[in-house]
Image: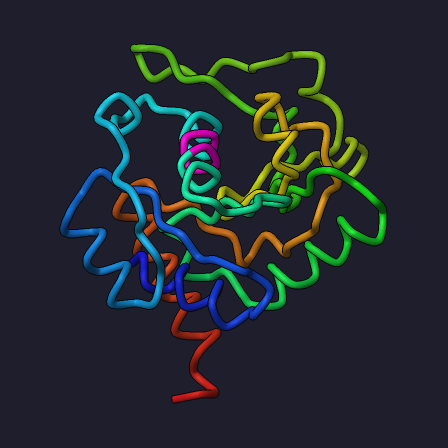
Amino acid sequence: MITYSIKTALDSKIFDKVVVSTDSDEIAEVARLSGAEVPFLRPNSLANDHTATIPVINHAIKNLEDGGDFIDKVCCIYPCSPLLLVDDLINSLELMLANKSNSCIPVCEFSSAPQRGFKIDKKHNLQWVDPNFKNIKTQDLQKLYHDTGSFYWASKEKWLEGDISNALAYMIPNWRVVDIDNNDDWIRAEIIYKILNSSSE
């Protein structure tokens, strides 16, 4: 899976380095064979299910700078991003540079209005998250967006500050966004990937 993200980053030709942060020797070897650099391994304290992204990036920045690298901007690309396109990386960077922004996050529109969402209790009864919206038509509600969970651009300073959320929005169509967390997500991603790549087969 990680080879898709590495290949997309390399094919974009906009990075001085493509570096993989991992605590796994196996993943590190796959990353190197795919063309990425793995100059350090991540400590166990930053390699569990509860580890946030920003501390991982900050650890990478410190290690790279300790090794003599100059860091200006960092793009964090998640490993489970097989639908990420080269154009996404290039165009989002250009958007950030053109607007002299310090961060840029890819987002997509919710496929249905989240304001009209439900909760389900232990007895499987539906409950409105916010009953104020139950009689409002979906098309009359303000459009809302969520991040795609695929990559994030920010200057080194923004990463080190610990908050990149005050960012430019780079739009990606929601049909091409899958955050792979379970088997259903995997199946959907496979279907979309095959469609996207059918012309090249």
* Magenta segment includes 59: yes
At 27% from the left and 26% from the top, the residue drawn is: 49
Residue range highlighted in magenta: 58-62
Quarter in which the N terminus is drawn: bottom left
At 41% from the left and 30% from the top, the residue drawn is: 59
- Comparing 130 with 135, the one in front is 130
Expressed as whole percent of the image width and height from the top left, the position of residue 186 reads 31, 53
At 47% from the left and 49% from the top, the residue drawn is: 77
Expressed as whole percent of the image width and height from the top left, the position of residue 154 reads 64, 39
* Magenta segment includes 5: no
Expressed as whole percent of the image width and height from the top left, the position of residue 152 reads 57, 43
Q: Quadrant of residue 173?
A: bottom right
- Comparing 173 with 82, the one in front is 82
Q: Quadrant of residue 192?
A: bottom left
- Comparing 90 with 60, the one in front is 60
Give the prevailing secondary structure in the magenta stretch.
helix
Q: Is residue 169 left or right of residue 193?
A: right
**Image vertical order of residue 38 relative to residue 52, above or below:** below
**Image vertical order of residue 5 relative to residue 72, above or below:** below
Q: Is residue 146 left or right of residue 118?
A: right
**Image vertical order of residue 165 relative to residue 127, above or below:** below
Q: How is the image coloured?
A: rainbow
Expressed as whole percent of the image width and height from the top left, the position of residue 5 reads 41, 59
Quarter in which the C terminus is drawn: bottom left
At 72% from the left and 35% from the top, the residue drawn is: 167
Which residue occupies the extreme left position in the image?
A: 26
